[in-house]
Structures are given as structure tokens and as C-alpha cells.
Image (spheres, grey):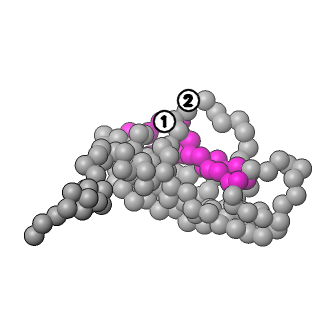
Amino acid sequence: MKFLPSTLCLLALLLPSCGDDDDDIRRSCGPAITISDGLISEESDPFQLVDAQIDGLCLEVIIAATSCSTANWSMDLFTFGQVAGRLPTQTSARLFFDDGLDETDFTCQVILTETYAFDLSPYLTPEVLPTQLTLTGTGTTLLVK
């Protein structure tokens, strides 16, 4: 069977890349958790955590909030970087939600949901696993293996 050079080029584009696995995780998982040694003084806009799941070192959360649209929403995940030393270890992180509106802006009273994912691998190294990750202020604790 003969392959034309253009067919081989197309086939090469369709095959999975041999790139770095860490880069693949971050692309599919979302931004990395932010490790900060200072307090986050800003208040998060109000939201409700609908669901939280761990898949490997990827945290996926679904949140709900009142708004007209999710277009300007953003969410970040912060931690102080401390891990308690017993097995399973224990740590915590805080979800910070910004609805993209000023306090004086009009908003609809419609409850909308959005899904966010965060890469935990820069923070939760194999030496501290398994760990119980508490999402501060949500009443949610997840086991990361």
C-alpha cells in the first residue's frame, strides 16, 4: 500500500504527542493551585459548592451562584503550603470566586453553575500522599491518593 506524503503528514498530526506528561495533565486539568505564604485578604464573591471530585492530582469543582451569565466568572485555588505529617496527611485550600461584577452592578437572580479544574501536582508531591484535602469554608474534605 502506498502513502502519499500529504497522507503521512496528516497521520502524524493525528497521532498522540510524545510530549511531557506534566504538560498534558495541566492542559486537561486546568491551572495549578497557587501556593501563598500570606493571607488572602479579599473576600470571595458568594457561591455554593455543588460538587467536588478528585481524579489523580486533578481537583474538579462545580459551583453555583446567582448571575446573568458565567462569562466573566473566574475561580482560583489557594493554599498556604502546609501539610500535617501523619498518614493520611492533611492539608487545606481555599476556593476564591470572582463573579466579575462590581458591588453596585445589577445582577440577575438566576442560579447558574460552572465547572472549574485545578492541577494539584505542584503542591501534592508523592511524599505527602495520600492526603485529606479540606476545601476551607465549604465543609468538604476529599482524599487525594
Is 78 placed above or below 25 here? above
Please tell me which residue is depicted at 57% across the width and 62% down the height of the picture. Answer: 115
> Does the magenta run of residues contain 75?
yes
Q: Which residues are magenta?
A: 72-99
Is 128 placed above or below 134 here? above
Residue at the far top in the pictured view: 37
Please give left or right for residue 102 compared with residue 38 in the image.
Answer: right
Residue 65 location in percent, x, y?
A: 72, 62
Residue 56 location in percent, x, y?
A: 36, 56
Q: Earlier in the sequence, mark 2 or mark 1?
A: 2
- Type of amino acid at the residue the image marks with label 1: Gly
Q: Secondary structure at mark 1?
A: loop
- Type of amino acid at the residue the image marks with label 2: Asp
- Nearer to us in this view, 13 or 140: 13
Q: Dot 2, crowdedness within 10 Å: few (<14), some or many (≥20)?
A: few
Q: Dot 1, crowdedness within 10 Å: few (<14), some or many (≥20)?
A: some
Pointer 2 residue? 37
- Nearer to us in this view, 24 or 96: 24
Please give left or right for residue 37 compared with residue 56 in the image.
Answer: right
Give the numbered dot on residue 67. none
